[in-house]
Image (cartoon, coloured by chain):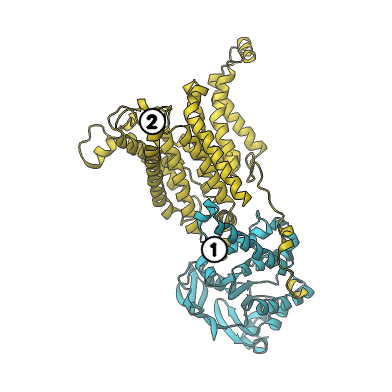
Amino acid sequence: MSARFRTLAWVLLTLVVLLGLDFGLQSLLPDSSIRQLLMLAAIYIMVAVSLNVINGMAGQFSIGHAGFVGIGAYTAAIIASHLHGSSSAIAGPGVQSFVHSWFLVPLSVGAGALVASLFGLLVGLPSLRLRGDYLAIVTLGFAEIFRLVIASAQIDATAGFARAIASLGGQNGYAGKDGQGVPLFAGPFWVFGAAIAMIVATWRIKFSGWGRALRALREDEIAAAAVGVDPTRYKVISFVLAAAGAGIAGGLWGTMRDGLGLVQPDQFTFQFSFDAITMVILGGSGSVTGSVLGALFVTFTVKFIELIQGVEIVKDLQRANPWLDLNALRMVIYAAVLIALMILRPEGVLGERELFGKRQKKAGDAGASGPSKPGAPSEAAA
Amino acid sequence: MSLLELGEVTKSFGGIKAVTRVSFQVPQGSIFGLIGPNGAGKTTVFNLITGVYRPDSGAIRFDGGDLTTKKSAQIAAVGVARTFQNIRLFSQMSVVDNVLVACETTRRTGLGGALGRSGAFRDEEHRMHEKALELLDLFQLRPLASERSTSLSYGNQRRLEIARAMMLGPKLLLLDEPAAGMNYGEAEGLNKQIRWLREHFNLTVVLVEHNMQVVMNVCEEIHVLDYGQTIAHGSPDEIRKHPKVLAAYLGEGV
């Protein structure tokens, strides 16, 4: 009873804070680039946390997550543009915009999730029946095909499928139905809210029979099947869930407030899939909170290196050593941090554990209320 | 009445005929032995019954249904549990979680219940947990419930594997070399344990075993394979004296 009540209180508190952010973030953080970075961090968290379901929990190596993010982004952008014809100008904090978002965001982002999960089923069903690296190759191929089909569309195509693809803007990106920009209605309420919801959802998957079955599958597929865990079913459904999560992340990315109002194929290159894998592995494969940490790390490291160049000590150092061009060294430092982490903690920062470790009841002690020991003969256990 | 029935089951791997036209019937409630020299195809027969492999031809019937084309997980769901020759536990998981994995076939609340943490989901999780602990209690593993399964001793790991199999609530239990690595005294204990399992869980047991002390004592009926073919079938006394069995184990001309 009281647990239920506490949950309800938490949900309400979260909603209030999110609402406050939706209306107040602009005055709180006047610099739109920082707001953008925060929202992007939430989107990366969703990308990492959803990828963690299939790569970490189910142990299937998917390296085409960018494809599903991209599908979500394009789908949501298209739906949002058609539902709401005009430009992004009116999307900002404000009651009218917020009311609009309740109509636009669930529909467009939901459609993004749906289409991404359909493609997830299409890709996962054949490749997850096979063992090993097939999924990696198929997902990589799928993501690249998706990107290249959109990027290489001929603008002057006249009919049919080619025309439809070309209307997505090719390499230049999709900027809404009339080229005025994608309507950007997904404010902090939606972006941060979805990130929190996705963290809770994946956490609950992990700590349920489903998560247990996935772990078992990852460790020994034959033994898991022998106790009734159907490998194909569990893997495919997990993969579809991961794709849906990526679709939501993509949909919000395409339509987020302070975004560009433009969805480009270059956002969804292999580099992005690779970043997502980095986030998951860095934080600890299979760990939900680890994925969150990984996503935050990847998002902010590069920004952090930019920021410390403003600090006096660093400036002094740079004056003394003209070769110390942090901007140029940014990716080198980033790579060095990754390598160091992989040497020091190859299983990721958290391994499979969680931050705020779920209090594990000592299973053996839980028997106080349990039935007394049935009279098994002692030799039964000899 | 037979619970399990193999009819002319054949399986080859490339050019090697692992199992050729093997037929036998396992009576309900019996303890049935499947023996033969190394490489005779005993474990392959287990793998065929449990759907790890699919027979090239022949039929496998269980409890009135057909298992021939079913997948492992479905076969487990209709009540066929097994252990493995080389113990296969989920090594990174706790002892109780190993047992709990086997409750998925009977789960009623789906993924939606898990996501919403519905009351039904919580009740079911709690019930499953209690059931797993009861089983662990029965196999005297309860104090180890939250240990990692690899930290258990060899004998405890074997018992945990059986406990996990029993979580399925099976009608048939396939034991693949349960006496492997046991000394005389332990094997004696195993005999009692197998009989106790049958009584307590109302099981039919099929075991693959090399240890004749176990096979001859505990089995009521024995089927002998050599090079993938049936060479004998009968009671322990008949098998002990069967010329083909003696030849297969000791060589011709003995």
**What residue type is disc 1 on?**
Arg
Q: Quadrant of residue B202?
A: bottom right
Q: Colour of chain A?
A: yellow
Q: Please indicate whether residue A196 sits to the left or right of residue B241 in the image.
A: left
Instruction: Judge by depth and name the residue closer to the eye, A120 or B248.
Output: A120
* Residue B107 numbered tag: 1
Residue B74 numbered mark, or none: none
Whole-percent x, y for residue A135 in the image: 46, 49
Side (left or right) of B16 relative to B243? left
Q: Nearer the viewer, residue A208 or A74?
A: A208
Name the front one of labels 1 and 2.
Answer: 2
Q: Residue at x 58, y 64 (%)?
A: B103
Q: Chain of mark 2?
A: A
Chain B hue?
A: cyan
- Give amino acid for label 2: Gln
User: Depth check: A233 or A141 in front?
Assistant: A233
Task: Confirm whether circles 1 and 2 share one chain.
Answer: no
Could you say whether the residue bearing mark 2 is in a helix, strand or loop? helix
Q: Is residue A256 above or below residue B177?
A: above
Q: Secondary structure at mark 1?
A: loop
Residue matched to label 2: A96
Query: Residue A55's spot in the image, x, y percent?
Result: 53, 46
**Viewer-closest of A173 and B206:** A173
Q: Answer with the quarter of the image where residue B226 lies.
A: bottom right
Residue A316's quadrant in the figure?
Answer: top right
Q: Is residue A314 above or below residue B23?
A: above
Residue drawn at point x = 56 percent, y = 57 percent: B119
User: Horizontal and vertical percent for residue A252?
Assistant: 43, 36
- Label 1: few (<14), some (14–19) or many (≥20) C-alpha neighbours in 10 Å: few
Q: Chain of mark 1?
A: B
Residue under the point 59% across and 51% down: A207
